Image (spheres, helix red, strand yellow):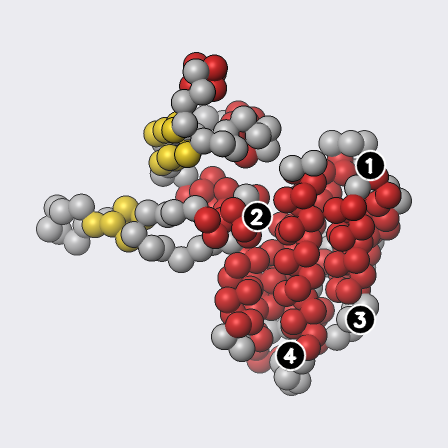
Amino acid sequence: MAKNIEQGCPVVIFDDVVNAIDDEHRDGIWRTFFEDGLLDDKQVILTSHAEEFLHRIQQELGAQRASDIKRYKFLPHNGEHELRVDSDPPTKNYVLLAQHAFAADDKREALRQARPALESLTDRVWTWLSRRGYGRIELGLSGPRSPWELNNKCIKLRKAVNGIAEQHTALLAVVAALDSLLNIGGRSIEWSYLNGAVHDSQRDHEFERATVRTIVEAIEAIDAALGALRNR
């Protein structure tokens, strides 16, 4: 790759790039590929058997870049021993999936995709803060075995980001998006769904379309702000 960069080659090909590599080295490879900007002007062709690695790529690239990539999925044969390829597999990017569901007026599906989107996006914001020395955040739990709630995470993260928001306009956009989410109210049926506390058999109320729109637009804004922070 160093030779490719030095010679200014327009294309770089990685064949099964993370095969037999531990998690620490995978993280380093990830940062080299998509965070350091070394490959931004190149066409990258990447193959991998590691489904989770490919899934992570589609989250951390952001919705815009994830929508621009071309994906191919090689499928198992059905006994005919011929190559089977899905040339248009569905995206795995949660923000895009939430957008598509909302556009189809499927509010429940939009929230189902918004939940992991918000988990991933807030993790990325938290990671950005940690690398700059602002990552200490205390999350409250209701009991010793209780999981933390996404609402509580957003409250604490919003406070941390707001403390340094003047350093970059993208941070102001993150604060505004978190404000719009938190203004919905932590006891709403929508936040109960995002926190994972509502199942189909327990859902007695309809989701409000305007509220779901606010949630989808908020994750879109955080995703865009992360892209701006990356390209700072």
What residue would you read off at disc 2? Answer: 62
Report helix, strand or loop for mark 1: loop
Which dot marks residue 209? 4
Label 4 and label 2: CA atoms lie apart by 24 Å
Label 1 and label 3: CA atoms lie apart by 26 Å
Using a 10 Å C-alpha cutoff, classify the residue at mark 4 as few (fewer than 14 neighbours), some (14 to 19) or many (20 or more). Answer: some
Earlier in the chain: of badge 1 and badge 3, it is 1
Q: Position of residue 219 (x, y in %)?
A: 66, 58
Quarter of the image where one finds residue 177: bottom right
Q: Amino acid at mark 4?
A: Arg
Using a 10 Å C-alpha cutoff, classify the residue at mark 2 as few (fewer than 14 neighbours), some (14 to 19) or many (20 or more). Answer: many
Can residue 143 be seen here? The reply is no
Looking at the rendered image, the disc whose residue lies closer to the viewer, 4 or 3, is: 4
Q: Residue at x 53, y 72 (%)?
A: 103
What residue would you read off at disc 1? Answer: 134
What residue would you read off at disc 3? Answer: 185
Callout 4–callout 2 Cβ contact below 8 Å = no
Residue extending farthest right: 163
Q: Residue at x 82, y 36 (%)?
A: 134
Quarter of the image where one finds residue 51: top left
Which dot marks residue 201? none
Looking at the rendered image, the disc whose residue lies closer to the viewer, 2 or 3, is: 2
Earlier in the chain: of badge 4 and badge 2, it is 2
Q: Nearer the viewer, residue 67 or 93?
A: 67
Q: Position of residue 118 (x, y in %)?
A: 65, 56
Direction from residue 181 to residue 212 in the image, left or right: left
Q: Nearer the viewer, residue 213 or 50?
A: 213
Callout 4–callout 1 Cβ contact below 8 Å = no
Callout 2–callout 3 Cβ contact below 8 Å = no
